[in-house]
Image (cartoon, coloured by chain):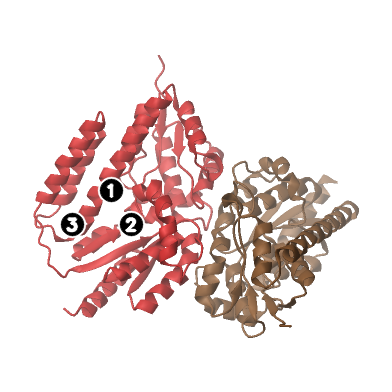
């Protein structure tokens, strides 16, 4: 039997589709290699492999791809144009496959989702399974099981967060942004560290049931059409009455965020700050900004009491 | 009777003429384009825009502020494409927060344009019937096509004109006559007449002149102010310029050519890259195959689709040994910097050509 290993860069879309990918390959019995958390070395090689104007998250991604280069047979690079009808994604995700192919010399397996052109995620995963030598039935059942698992895990995560928010006695901060910014060691990790020092309870905007997007989103924006930004906006609108402050995390220079942040900042009525992260961030500057933000919230709380 | 409300829209090169033609025929309002772009426009736009939004947003916002100060009360924004589709809502919010009172009108919510959304726009504009609206839409699309055809000829020859400014003066005259056209026949006649006049203009064009292609993002390609009059600069250097992006292309040619383009560059792109990304990869391949001397790629700072495409374009060009230069425009770009880089590029092309 030929054993192949698939490398997954543990950044960018990984934080969105972690459960789905790992379960899918797990069900098919394929060995998966993950890249480690972002460190200085990965970041540097990422910067070397990408354009200086590319966004920080993309630079980090290229670093992860470079890390995996000799450690697996194939690297999984998805290509997503639209994941919901009449909605779009950042064009980086549409270019991801061709871009990775052009910039680094690696073997790639990919899948292509473009719901607007009737290419669904299910069909894409079946094709992916087939390209790895599995039958249609095997691939489909693996996908469906993985999808089910993803749903269960998401629900559990949401319940834990909602419980925590109810019982929290400390300052409640919503960390809002794309999951690949929030959970990345280099981007969100620094912020989480400082917040923990300040003894604040942290909640994440990506833990949210996206069924409610049409209900929550119009409070902040009506016309936004980037799926991930819609979810983020809706989640902020949903958590706004339940938390004390919001920290908006953006990687420089994110295209969709540049506009949707403006709407969020103008339409949210509790303390909110926008941290824009690039590769040359100083930790001290970050600490000062977050600490003073927490101070403002504490003062406000005292006045309200 | 009270005064008519004023409908206004942002600039995009010379295209304000067909847009004004269309809107003034099908709407009940008085139509007035925004005041011409100046340094002040971009300063105003930058002041009130988010930090790292792309430059077209800033230009548009500056246009809006100036036109609102001039008494406009309804603003028209197209939308569609990558970030463009989300411009209207954010701009509306920023301007309303500044205290302006107006109505914002867009074609197609959420960046999706189809027949139904067009019908809605026509309804909102006034009492114009759908047949009349379609007729005038057809006329303005035709006008755009004629303008673009003339522009292609101008770009090829303006660098070699014998009498200075003869091309631009004639073009100005033509545009004025276009805006006064009544129907299909007068439009067509005007086009024929001026095309002949353009061909009669004297040019002194050497056989082996330098030929350069401009590719890149659409707004900086079409709005001369946003690219700091790059094309004029090239014309002064006696270079023949080819540019692909124009409204004709965006309106229908792009859709028709997509499959063909993807087939031709399948070694580099398997899928589209969003907005005009893949188109630009194809164009650079095309320019290489046609034996052009150099490529100039222009985009606003932070343009995501182009950033995705540039590494691929670089690969295409380096494999073929094609000189290419990248310009990224922002509201604070220094004009001298651009000129210096352009001159160096020009010298390099000239040496390569062996003069």
Residues at marks 1 and 2 on the same chain: yes
Quadrant the C terminus of chain B occupies: bottom left
Classify residue B295 as left or right of residue A302.
Answer: left
Marks 1 and 3 in Cβ contact (< 8 Å): no
Quadrant the N terminus of chain B occupies: top left
- Please name the residue that numbered disc 3 is placed on: B158
Q: Give how far apart the Cα atoms at labels 1 and 2 are.
A: 10 Å
Marks 2 and 3 in Cβ contact (< 8 Å): no
For marks 2 and 3, give the one nearer the viewer: 2
- Please name the residue that numbered disc 1 is placed on: B148
Crowdedness of circle 1 by 10 Å Cα count: few (<14), some, many (20+)? some
- Please name the residue that numbered disc 2 is placed on: B244
**Disc 2 or 3, which lies upstream in sequence?**
3
In the displayed structure, A230 sits above or below B102; it is: below
**Can residue A83 be seen from the camera position used here?**
yes
Marks 1 and 2 in Cβ contact (< 8 Å): no
Q: Give how far apart the Cα atoms at labels 1 and 3 are.
A: 15 Å
Residues at marks 2 and 3 on the same chain: yes
Of B264 and B14, the residue lying toward us: B264
The residue furthest right is A167
Kindly identify the residue that appears in the image at 56 percent across and 66 percent down.
A96
| Residue B329 x/y as whole percent | 40, 61
In which chain is the residue bearing label 3? B
* Secondary structure beneath label 3: helix
Kindly identify the residue that appears in the image at 58 percent across and 80 percent down.
A44
**Disc 1 or 2, which lies upstream in sequence?**
1
| Chain colored brown | A
């Amino acid at each position: 039997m030929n054993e192949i290993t698939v490398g997954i860069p543990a950044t960018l879309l990984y934080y969105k589709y972690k459960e789905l990918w790992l379960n899918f390959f797990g069900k098919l019995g394929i060995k998966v290699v993950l890249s480690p958390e972002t460190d200085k070395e990965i970041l540097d090689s990422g910067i070397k492999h990408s354009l200086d104007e590319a966004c920080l998250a993309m630079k980090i991604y290229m670093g992860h791809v470079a890390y995996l280069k000799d450690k697996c047979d194939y690297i999984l690079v998805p290509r997503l144009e639209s994941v919901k009808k009449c909605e779009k994604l950042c064009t980086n995700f549409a270019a991801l496959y061709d871009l990775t192919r052009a910039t680094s010399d690696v073997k790639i397996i990919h899948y292509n989702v473009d719901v607007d052109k009737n290419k669904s995620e299910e069909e894409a995963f079946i094709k992916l399974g087939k390209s790895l030598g599995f039958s249609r039935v095997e691939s489909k059942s693996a996908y469906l099981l993985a999808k089910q698992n993803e749903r269960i895990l998401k629900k559990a995560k949401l319940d834990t967060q909602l419980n925590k928010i109810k019982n929290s006695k400390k300052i409640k901060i919503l960390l809002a942004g794309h999951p690949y910014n929030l959970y990345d060691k280099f981007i969100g990790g620094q912020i989480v560290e400082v917040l923990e020092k300040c003894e604040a309870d942290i909640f994440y905007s990506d833990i949210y049931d996206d069924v409610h997007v049409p209900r929550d989103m119009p409070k902040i924006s009506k016309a936004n059409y980037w799926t991930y930004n819609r979810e983020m906006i809706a989640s902020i609108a949903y958590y706004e009455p339940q938390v004390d402050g919001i920290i908006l995390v953006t990687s420089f220079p994110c295209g969709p965020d540049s506009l949707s942040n403006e709407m969020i900042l103008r339409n949210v009525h509790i303390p909110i700050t926008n941290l824009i992260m690039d590769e040359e961030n100083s930790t001290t500057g970050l600490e000062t900004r977050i600490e003073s933000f927490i101070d403002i919230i504490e003062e406000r709380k005292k006045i309200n009491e | 009777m009270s005064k008519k409300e004023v409908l206004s829209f942002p600039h995009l090169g010379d295209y304000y003429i067909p847009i004004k033609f269309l809107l003034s025929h099908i709407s009940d309002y008085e139509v007035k384009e925004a005041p011409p772009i100046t340094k002040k426009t971009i300063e105003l736009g930058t002041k009130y825009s988010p930090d790292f939004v792309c430059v077209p947003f800033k230009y548009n916002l500056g246009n809006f502020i100036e036109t609102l100060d001039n008494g406009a009360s309804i603003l028209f924004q197209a939308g569609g494409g990558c970030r463009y589709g989300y411009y209207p809502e954010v701009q509306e919010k920023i301007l309303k927060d500044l205290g302006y009172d107006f109505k914002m009108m867009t074609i197609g919510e959420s960046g999706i344009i189809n027949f139904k959304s067009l019908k809605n726009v026509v309804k909102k504009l006034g009492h114009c019937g759908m047949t009349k609206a379609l007729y005038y839409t057809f006329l303005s699309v035709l006008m755009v096509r004629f303008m673009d055809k003339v522009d292609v000829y101008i770009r090829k020859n303006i660098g070699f004109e014998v009498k200075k400014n003869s091309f631009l003066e004639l073009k100005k005259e033509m545009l004025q006559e276009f805006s006064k056209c009544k129907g299909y026949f007068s439009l067509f006649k005007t086009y024929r007449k001026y095309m002949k006049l353009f061909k009669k203009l004297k040019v002194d064009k050497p056989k082996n002149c330098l030929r350069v292609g401009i590719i890149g993002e659409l707004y900086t390609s079409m709005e001369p102010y946003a690219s700091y009059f790059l094309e004029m600069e090239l014309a002064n250097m006696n270079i023949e310029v080819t540019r692909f992006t124009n409204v004709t292309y965006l309106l229908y040619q792009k859709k028709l050519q997509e499959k063909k383009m993807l087939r031709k560059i399948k070694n580099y792109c398997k899928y589209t890259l969003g907005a005009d990304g893949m188109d630009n990869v194809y164009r650079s391949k095309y320019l290489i195959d046609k034996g052009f001397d150099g490529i100039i790629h222009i985009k606003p700072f932070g343009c995501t689709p182009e950033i995705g495409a540039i590494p691929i374009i670089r690969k295409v060009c380096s494999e073929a040994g094609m000189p290419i230069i990248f310009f990224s425009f922002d509201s604070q770009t220094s004009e001298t910097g651009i000129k210096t880089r352009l001159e160096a590029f020009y010298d390099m092309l000239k040496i390569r050509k062996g003069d």
